[in-house]
Amino acid sequence: QVQLVESGGGSVQPGGSLRLSCAASGGTLSSYSVAWFRQAPGKDREVVAAIKINGYGTYYRDTVKGRFTISRDNGKTTVSLQMNSLNPEDTAVYYCAAGAGSLITSSLRHASSYDFWGQGTQVTVSS
């Protein structure tokens, strides 16, 4: 059983930046494909970005391309989401999710591909 712990959420003004981190309690994420999802009030949960085990395959939803970057640290103990040029539409609870094994690219965006989920961290973008 993998327990995921997110950190780095908070409040920021439009145009600002935040960096979210996801770590596996008591272990590493080296054997998992990892994604960040978000859920805004009254909306469905949606994938934001995902990264394959090898770190070279990634997926981004269109609305965050060029602004967000998902990455693994060299020790594969954490997966980070660097979020730049934030806007109010990015306000949501952000969740880290891990899926065992190497997912194919077309599976990265689907919540059903992931076995473990964190508790979420709030990101609020407002002036």
Image: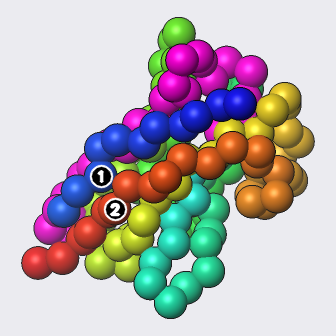
The relative height of residue 64 versus residue 91 in the rendered view (above or below) is: above
Residue 8 seen in this snapshot: yes
Q: What is the total number of numbered labels drawn onto the structure image?
A: 2
The front one of 123 and 104 is: 123
Q: In this view, does 49 lie to the left or right of 116?
A: left
For mark 1, does the 10 Å Cα neighbourhood hold few (<14), some (14 to 19), or many (20 or more) residues?
some
Determine the residue positioned at 61% across, 80% down. Answer: 44
SS at mark 1 in the image: loop
The front one of 58 and 122 is: 122
Do labels 2 and 1 touch, CB within 8 Å? yes
Q: What residue range appears in magenta?
A: 12-35
The relative height of residue 5 versus residue 83 in the rendered view (above or below) is: above
Mark 2 lies on residue: 122
Q: Which amino acid does label 2 sit on?
A: Gln
Q: Based on the picture, tell me whether residue 84 belongs to the magenta stretch.
A: no
For mark 2, does the 10 Å Cα neighbourhood hold few (<14), some (14 to 19), or many (20 or more) residues?
some
Determine the residue positioned at 61% across, 72% down. Answer: 45
Residue 66 seen in this snapshot: no
The x, y position of residue 80, in whole percent, is 45, 36
SS at mark 2 in the image: strand
Q: In this view, does 8 lie to the left or right of 69?
A: left
Q: Mark on residue 9?
A: 1
Query: Extreme top residue here?
Result: 75
Please state, as top left, top right, bottom left or bottom right, where the N terminus lies in the image.
top right
Q: Answer with mark 2 or mark 1, whichever residue precedes in sequence.
A: 1
The x, y position of residue 51, in whole percent, is 66, 38
Q: In which quarter of the image is residue 122?
A: bottom left
The front one of 127 and 78 is: 78
Q: What residue type is labelled 1?
A: Gly
Q: Which colour scheme is used?
A: rainbow
